[in-house]
Amino acid sequence: MTLAQGSAGAVLTVDLTALQNNYRYLAAQLGQARCGAAVKADAYGLGAAQVATALYSAACRDFFVAHLHEAISLRRSLPSDAALYVMHGSPVGHEAEFLQHQCIPVLNSLQQIKAWGNLACQQQRALPAIVQFDTGMARMGLDQQETQQFLSQPELRAGIQIHYLMSHLSVAERKDHELNQLQLQRMQEIRAALPGIPASFANSSGIFLGAAFQMDLVRPGAALYGVNPHQNQVNPMQAVAYLQGRIIQTREIAAGVGVGYGGSWVSSKPSRIATVGVGYADGWLRSLSNRGWVEIAGHKVAMVGNVSMDTITLDVSEIPVEHLQEGALVDLLSDRITVDQVAQQAGTIGYEILTSLGARYERQYRQAETA
Ligand SMILES: *Cc1c(COP(=O)(O)O)cnc(C)c1O
């Protein structure tokens, strides 16, 4: 949906040049490994087609989504030399659609592996797949027992052209956490049992755990979109998502007046309140009620009162009125108000802030001419 300029409550600008710079920065951390990209959940809310196209121009050729339907709609935007991997694998009975749409499943269970092998047998050709192993987060992939079965029964691999052995890190952002080493060791044992097959292990943070973790293909998501891959270090990534809300109305209130639902904020003195057209239905989480700040023309402004479905309210008492005209823009995400900061104020992680970004925004994609 494209919204006419000025008709939406907010403008989401996605900086595709910053995205490409982030991709090149991550790729530069790698030795021999290829740099792929996680573009699931509409590229973390920023628009999978636009994001994947920009990453393809930056030389990315390996894309990961969660669901088959995400892959089917993204396939149209990507040239045929780009590999599109579906991390949830094939829903039972949908195997043939992977061939039809040129998508590659990540096989997570012996059942999925057998179904893929059967299809290969019917087709009388080897079919590509990734096989995922659970090395320590108890979420997806073959568990330890299934892994032993898979390694000891070569017939399970018949007809399957394994592009990568894959696993996923549980606490990669905590560099000295012992689980990282344990997962690495388990992954190395699996690799040793299946020599010659490439492996994919690291997400954004995993890239910074060193060459042993990078293996042959990395799968960053969050860092590409500007989220800090480090826990206690300066963010090396550039901001990609910029969000600007519009002032709908302003009003003067006396001291002692409650603002918004429940009157959870009460003015201590005569104040000026601005209402902005972004609310929790747009992904501006209700947990941001009475927390954090935004900016108007470079001035810091506190959010006051509860976040409503379609609006937030700001205490703009100190802001020069010329910046408070109806339709004036308010910065909600910018170079100074980062996704990570907003996440911290909301009590969540940057991933959730990005993937919650609303469908009602006017969306703009920005790209430098020379990129
Ligand atoms: C989401 C996801 C990624 C990307 O992780 P980031 O932390 O966003 O870099 C990589 N691999 C798997 C299996 C994932 O689910």
Image (cartoon, rainbow, N blue to C red):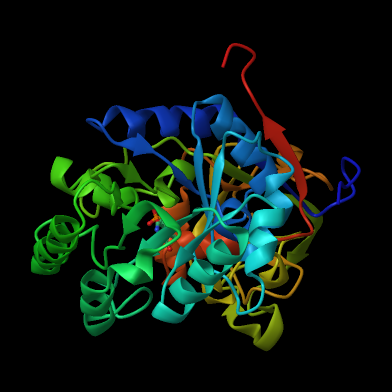
Quadrant location of the C terminus in the rendered image: top right
Q: Is residue 20 left or right of residue 146?
A: right
Number of labels in the image equals 0
Q: Is residue 303 visible?
A: no
Residue 24, position in %: x, y?
Answer: 40, 27
120 is higher (above) or lower (below) than 80: below
Residue 21, quarter of picture: top left
Residue 307, position in %: x, y?
Answer: 64, 73
Residue 12, position in %: x, y?
Answer: 69, 46
Q: Residue furthest bottom?
A: 262
Residue 224, quarter of picture: top left
Q: Is residue 191 left or right of residue 236?
A: left
Q: Is residue 143 left or right of residue 180?
A: right
99 is higher (above) or lower (below) than 208: below
Residue 109, position in %: x, y?
Answer: 41, 77
> Residue at horizontal 59%, vertical 69%?
304
| Frontmost residue, 313 versus 342 | 342
Task: Indicate which quadrant contains ligand 1.
Answer: bottom left
| Frontmost residue, 354 versus 318 | 354
314 is higher (above) or lower (below) than 297: below
| Frontmost residue, 204 versus 249 | 204
> Residue at horizontal 69%, vertical 62%?
97
Residue 217, quarter of picture: top left
Q: Residue furthest top?
A: 370
Q: Is residue 20 visible?
A: yes
Q: Is residue 91 left or right of residue 20?
A: right
